[in-house]
Image: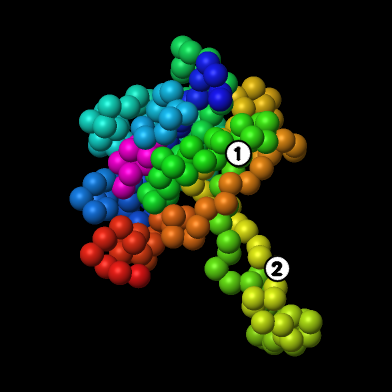
Amino acid sequence: MIEDKKVLAVIPARGGSKRLPRKNVLPLAGKPLIAWTIEAGKGSKYIDKIVVSSDDDEILEIARNYKVDTIKRPSYLATDEAKTVDVVKHVLENQRENFKYIILLQPTSPLRKAEHIDEAFEILIKKNADAVISVCPVDHPVQWCNTLPDNLSMINFISEEVLNKRSQELPVYYRINGAIYIVKTERFITEHTFFLKDKIFAYIMDRKSSIDIDDKIDFKIASVLVDKSIEL
């Protein structure tokens, strides 16, 4: 158990988005995109408080309608250059309570559920960890990837060893999926990152639950994945 140690969830949601305008309020299966993450956070048995940080009044109103706390983000934290860790620190600095852990839940991961959050916390407890970050398998073997020169030559693009193996024979690689970041508060404040140098472990999620909405195509894929009438 986490006992009486409090957990603060931070949901950062800017009003602006270049690739998909107003994405955090776009309706996904009848609910604003951000609502999916709020509901996942509210369903977790480990989270004590949820705060939505935004520069946008519509997003803040949606959050209040879902009965979570909000904080108006200053303009310098709402630019394309603003760092998420600074947004989280701003939320922390405006809390009256002290929290043992912080969990960052990005609204662009709508298929991350309360069960995923709880499983990530259970890894934190089991491993006696100070941080847990969610990952998922990469779509294709990274051994098939390389850079290309200006003339597009593919000489030595893939090694002979890789060419002679099936994809199933290659080691599985994982990528950060952006859905869950848990960190001990004192270390976050000291080290200014979720990616600690030690006592950090991965929580593996499936690719379907790891959809990260960045553009219109991602949003359409998410719409299909949440449509229960469509068999995949």
Q: In the rendered image, which quarter is residue 214 located in? A: bottom left
The residue tagged 2 is: 171
* Label 1 packing within 10 angstroms: few (<14), some (14-19), many (20+): some
169 to the left or right of 122: right
Q: Residue at x 62, y 59 (%)?
A: 174
Which amino acid, mark 1? Ile
Report the front residue among 186 and 13: 186
Q: Is residue 90 visible?
A: no
Q: Residue 28: x, y in percent? A: 27, 53
Reading the image, the residue beneath label 1 is 123
Compared with 189, 85 (above or below) is: below
Residue 203 % position (x, y): 58, 46
Q: Residue at x 53, y 16 (%)?
A: 4
Q: Main secondary structure of the magenta part?
A: helix
Q: Quadrant of residue 120?
A: top right
Please give the name of the residue rendered at 35% of the width and 70% of the height, measured from the top-left corner. Answer: 232
Label 2, secondary structure: give it.
loop
Above or below, 110 relative to 128: below
The verdict on residue 77 being magenta is no
Task: Locate residue 14 relative to residue 98 in the image: left or right.
Answer: left
Please identify, in this view, whether the residue under mark 2 or under mark 1 is nearer the observer: 1
Residue stretch in magenta: 33-41
Kindly tell me whether residue 165 is visible in this rendering: yes
Front residue of this view, candidates 227 and 220: 227
